[in-house]
Image (cartoon, coloured by chain):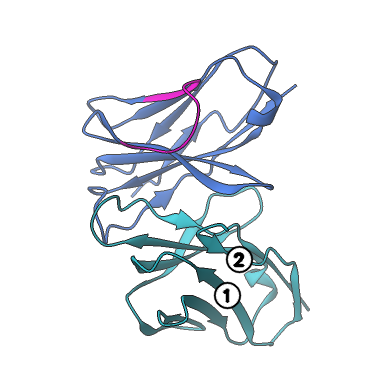
Chain colours: A blue, B cyan
Amino acid sequence: KAGVTQTPRYLIKTRGQQVTLSCSPISGHRSVSWYQQTPGQGLQFLFEYFSETQRNKGNFPGRFSGRQFSNSRSEMNVSTLELGDSALYLCASSLAGAQGNTIYFGEGSWLTVV
Amino acid sequence: QKEVEQDPGPLSVPEGAIVSLNCTYSNSAFQYFMWYRQYSRKGPELLMYTYSSGNKEDGRFTAQVDKSSKYISLFIRDSQPSDSATYLCAMSPTGGSYIPTFGRGTSLIVHP
């Protein structure tokens, strides 16, 4: 079956702009989570959505937001981009987002802020 | 101190060597332990998943958990150049948020 699909794969934005990243989870998966990965900080959890509701949230400023649609597809938005937002943004899906559920990652969206 | 510590490497070994990758952690509530492999410019993929203490083997890979020492390991036998990747450990507690906490990853290079 198809894996987690993220679009776009690569993008370049200017400081102050905003960006929207999209994620299609594995069919049947209802939990979608987002992570930011940088060489300095590693993989950091942004937020998790389940049945269109944000269920868990990491320690990121309010410029980072997300949503989930009724078909489980998710988007994340970063407003007022800063140079430090340059990172690989990873989406992961799991069946129900519960203990013991494997999470599967997409290929990621590479964001460069200039 | 970060909850999960992992040496970033790089760790360079010759083909055929036994590789040991390790993580230490501070949260005694962690019960689920995972290892992910991430190739360059790709997303992480799950390699091994263990619950509580003990060993788990899958082909050339063995995951080991020592909860008394708060130390987990991933062993790779007969390492291959195709094993060259970044290996991330991750762990989560029982109850509460299941969201795993990741180590920063160890870069492994297996040279022919």
Q: What residue lies at 55% left-to-right and 71% top-to-bottom?
A: B23
**Residues in magenta?**
A56-66
Up-down relation of residue A108 to residue A73 (above or below): below
> Where does residue A67 sit, x and y in percent of width and height?
34, 24
- The mark found on residue B22 in the picture is 1
Q: Quadrant of residue A89?
A: top right
The CA distance from mark 1 to mark 2 is 7 Å
**Residue type at numbered disc 2:** Gln
Residue under label 2, please give it: B6
Q: Residues within 10 Å of mark 2 (few under 14, many from 20)?
A: some
> Quick one: SS at disc 1?
strand
> Where does residue B87 sit, x and y in percent of width and height?
58, 65
- Circles 1 and 2, Cβ within 8 Å, touching? The answer is yes
Q: What residue lies at 28% left-to-right and 24% top-to-bottom?
A: A69
For mark 2, name the chain.
B
Toward the front, the furthest residue is B1
Q: Is residue A67 left or right of residue A8?
A: left
Instruction: Give the camera-side residue of A43 and B3.
Output: B3
Question: Looking at the figure, which quarter contains the C terminus of chain A?
Answer: top right
Q: Quadrant of residue B79?
A: bottom right
> Magenta includes A48?
no
Q: Residues within 10 Å of mark 1 (few under 14, many from 20)?
A: many
